[in-house]
Amino acid sequence: MSHEQSGASLVDYLKALPQYLMPGHAISRLIHAFTRIRHPAIRKPFTRWFVRQFGINMDEAIQSDPTSYPHFNAFFTRELKPGIRPICAEADALACPVDGRVSQAGPIRAGRVFQAKGHDYSLQTLLGGDAELAARFAGGHFTTIYLSPRDYHRIHMPCAGTLREMILVPGRLFSVNPATTRVIPGLFARNERVVSIFDTEFGAMAMVKVGAVNVGSIETVWAGEVSPPAAKQVTRWQYQGEQAMTLAKGEEMGRFNMGSTVVLVMANPALRWADDFTANVPVRLGQCIAKLNPSAP
């Protein structure tokens, strides 16, 4: 396949090529340590630079002074002021789980998830290789949302849900920026990721938090930092009985320590993505992104 056929440019390929040789996990461990340095001579100038470089609106944060955070990661995962991201109230609607930009949104076809022109990947692989779990989402829908460095990096529930399973899937730590997405086959099913499975009123839901270079640290509100250390094998946690935590629509469920991508997978075939929820469109936490289609069979 030529790069014209895949929708990618030669520049995209040249940017992606060095990533096959980079020690992604080692780099991410160094970034993990750097972003937790507390010395003001390091954290303050770096944080000021970051705010200027990416045009971050600190007026939205509860703690609006970027140099007042104990370390850079605390700033990066900063909490927003209450009400700054209203959650859509319609009972038949999904709320956007993050700030970011839509990469793709659409149906799951023959167990495959669309990544970019010329590329798709196996839903079963994305979810850690469990064929029975993947079958629950046959005929469902997915969306992939990319979080840039300037975005808010906490992840919230698009609807109320009861946690049933968490899966840590080992993998690479390629960048997940748009250029890399266009050229690395099966990118989101190759990177390390944390999969959270919920039962919801819309049916089964999988929230997949995809790691990336510089983003080897993923947290959930029920387990804290799940990675690092890097996963050696697929690891599963089951949540039944008293462990089956229920989270409300709009409630925080996790965060990225540095930016990355979420893949939201919904089993309900009657969901319909909003007309303005399409590739390359910026989105904000809480906005309505999908509704049930009453005419669906």
Image (tube, rainbow, N blue to C red):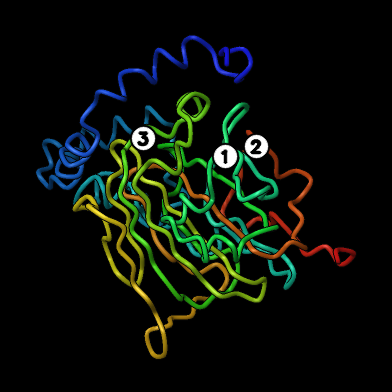
Residue 85 located left or right of residue 54 = right
* Residue 43: percent from left, percent from top: 18, 40
**Disc 1 marks which amino acid?**
Arg
What residue is shown at x 58% (from left), y 74% (from top)? 160
- In the depicted view, which residue is nearer to us: 219 or 41? 219
Badge 1: residue crowd in 10 Å (few <14, some 14–19, many ≥20): many
Considering the numbered disc 3 on the image, is that residue within a helix, a strand or a loop? Answer: helix
For mark 2, what is the residue?
A: 281
What residue is shown at x 48% (from left), y 80% (from top)? 246
Marks 3/2 in contact by CB < 8 Å: the verdict is: no
Q: CA distance from mark 1 to mark 2?
A: 6 Å
Counting residues from the start of the chain, the first of labels 3 and 1 encountered is: 3
Residue 249 located left or right of residue 11 = right
Residue 43 located left or right of residue 109 = left
Q: How many marks?
A: 3
Give the label on residue 51, or none.
Answer: 3
Q: Nearer the viewer, mark 3 or mark 1?
A: 1
For mark 1, what is the residue?
A: 101
**Disc 3 marks which amino acid?**
Val
What residue is shown at x 79% (from left), y 46% (from top)? 275
